[in-house]
Amino acid sequence: MATINNAPYLLDTPPPPPRPYGLFDVAMGPMQFPVPAAQGGGVIYVPDTCEDDVFLYAMNCPPVSGTKTFSTNESPVSGMPFAVITSYTCGTIGYTFDEVEQKVRTRMMLREQRGVERRVWQGSPLGGIGGIAGLFQSATTLTAAACPTEAVAALEQALADNGVVGGIIHARPYMASHLANAHILERYQGRQITTYRGVPVCFGEGYNGTGPAGQAVTATTEYMYASGRVMIWGSEVHVPPLRETLDRSLNQQMALAERVFAVSIECGVWAIQVTRDCTTD
């Protein structure tokens, strides 16, 4: 008599889904570090996108008098290095070293963007291991907006008033439906979501909606930001040899994936508190 085996059949892990929409879709990068030493010391450069001077003069006859004005060089921007880490542990060895490494690399691929977004918006707790401040904490705060439409209008105007080229609007995913309901998000360019004016809008899963000074999200309000271009550099993903992270006394496999990043923001950052409104403008 044939034996019937009702145990589930163990499949290979299905392929991972695409990386979520976020900062990597609107920023420049991640790019390779220009030299290995930049992974420890960061990067600094002088941008060409932030000087907003525009000068006019009349073509009168007789000719006008005076001198033409020359703008100064732009202020340098920098990006200090930080690391994003993903890990894996299994109490019973059931996978090969190659399979374990693939698991921890997949986790990095799916989650590294969220880590970079946290660095940009709120950072990580300063009291924790390697605490780091968010880059948006230096933002210029605009007058609060009564609805999402006014918030986007104010942020786009701030970018225009300051002559920012390549600006980005940032919000947590909670705001995506509110902006769609207000008919603000109508253009798509590849994976980018943009406003009518063509400004990319980043709904980062790592963003938490807080203000520049850590003002908390409430039942009716949260913060949105506008910034100049965001530039990202990233190292190769490093996974220490798994034979060195195997606890043989407990038969426990541990794995770690680490990637070093540096982020710079050009031209400035502007913040606005917005009251969420479900009416259609």
Image: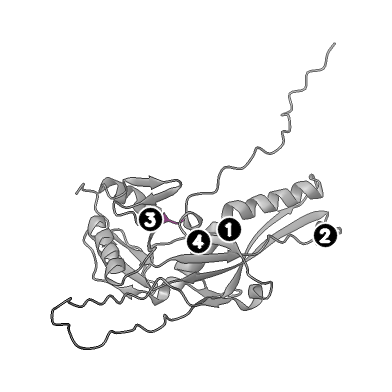
The image's colouring method is one colour
Compared to residue 176, the image places residue 1 above or below, namely above
Q: Which contiguous range is marked in magenta?
A: 200-204
Q: Which mark is residue 196?
A: none
Q: Is residue 203 magenta?
A: yes
Q: Nearer the viewer, mark 1 or mark 3?
A: 3
Q: In the rendering, which numbered label is found on residue 247?
A: 2
> Hey, what amino acid is under mark 1?
Glu
Q: Which mark is residue 28?
A: 4
Report which residue position mark 1 lands on: 112
Residue 94: say if magenta.
Answer: no
Mark with earlier residue (4, 1) = 4
The residue pinned by badge 3 equals 201
Q: Main secondary structure of the magenta part?
A: strand
Of the pair 42 and 241, the residue shown nearer to us: 42
Quadrant (top left/top right/bottom left/bottom right) for the N terminus: top right
User: What kind of element bears circle 4?
Assistant: strand
Asked if the residues shown at circle 3 and circle 4 are in contact, with their CB atoms under 8 angstroms apart, the answer is no
Secondary element type, mark 1: helix
Gap in angstroms between the C-alphas marked 2 and 1: 26 Å
